[in-house]
Image (cartoon, rainbow, N blue to C red):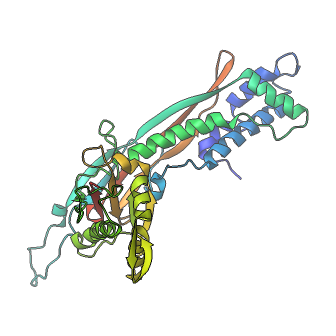
Amino acid sequence: MPLPQSIRAFHPQSPAIEEMATVCANESEYEVSRRADANETLIVSQALQTVTLDALRAVYPGILFRQLASQQGGLTPGTASFTWDEYDVAGMAKLIANYGDDLPDVTAFITQNVGIVRSLGNAFKYSKQDVRAVLEARRLGRQGIVLDVDRVALAREIMERKKDEIAAIGSPLGKLPGILKNPNVTVLSAAAPATGTSKKWTGVDKTGQEIVTDLRNLTSQVRIQSKGIHSPTTVVMPIEEYEAASRKSLTINNMETTALAHFLNTETQSGRAIQVMQWNRAAKADAAGTGPRVMAYEASAEAVRVVEPLDFEADPPQRVGLEFRVPCESRFGGIYIRRPLAFAYLDFV
């Protein structure tokens, strides 16, 4: 099976790997030369491949951006920019007379945008002694010994968390769009409670039934503003608000349930099944950037897409003194919204 692009730098034929293995193998305790070093080269290469593959398989808790939108196709790691059309209304058509020349111009309802793909980078390193330890373990028959996976895993996790942050709120400086911060998406406010003053779901004033009402208003907004063209399939909320909605109780037909369970059940019964996702990035995503934001949207490729031309790539190791430094890179363009009418935000929750 061919190696993934993201670890091609660790292929056994890589000159850098050969040099890395040979430097260690040329030490007196191994008494081998570059020409006689094929076995050691293969061992080190396999160790590095295993390390990187383990890092790519890792699932980092709290990182959600890939689950929120379909991947934008047609991009390569060399892509510097991309364009997309943003539809701010449903568009319109009309009946016309024979040979009519008063056709409505749908381009009037489209905003063309240009996005930038940025590079994220960091590095990890191994010492000559780290490589010697692997070689020695293999020589003694311990084939399962590999290089420390934590270093490459940490390098990738740091990149993943930065991309998750950008995907949520964007990066104005880098001109990268975020799914929770589109200026063309309708923003609603949570309703005031019947008793008390705090609209917060986590407070004591808001009841379970009032949380259900907030959620219904949010999801209904998408259907109403799009004239039924879009229907929300996903609701994203901060962790604390999720916990409040899933714990505050209410009684329906003499049976006790929770706000979130009742909301989801009634949506399913209406033929509109909705997935609820917890995302900590939404905790500071409101208009002021200081409070929680709940989002309802249609998670279709027509409505929203994530731009990630390069997931993670580790370059060939570079010898620096007694260490081998491995530069890492990713390419990211954020998450862009094509159909703002398929979205609605809810603040002051």
Task: Tell me where residue 13 appears, x and y as whole percent.
Answer: 72, 36
Which residue of the protein is positioned furthest toward the right in this rendering? 140
Task: Tell me where residue 181 appears, x and y as whole percent.
Answer: 29, 50
Task: Tell me where residue 115 appears, x and y as whole percent.
Answer: 32, 46
The residue closer to the viewer here, 205 or 172, is 205
Q: Residue at x 88, y 21 (%)?
A: 30
Q: Residue at x 25, y 60 (%)?
A: 190
Relative to 192, say whether 133 is above or below: above
Q: Residue at x 45, y 40 (%)?
A: 162
Relative to 70, say whether 12 is above or below: above
Q: Is residue 69 at least partly visible in the picture? A: no
The residue closer to the viewer here, 304 or 317, is 304
Q: Residue at x 9, y 74 (%)?
A: 101
Quadrant hosting residue 41: top right
Figure quadrant of the C terminus:
bottom left
Quadrant hosting residue 347: bottom left
Q: Is residue 88 at least partly visible in the picture? A: yes
Q: Is residue 291 left or right of residue 121?
A: left
Q: Is residue 281 left or right of residue 153?
A: left
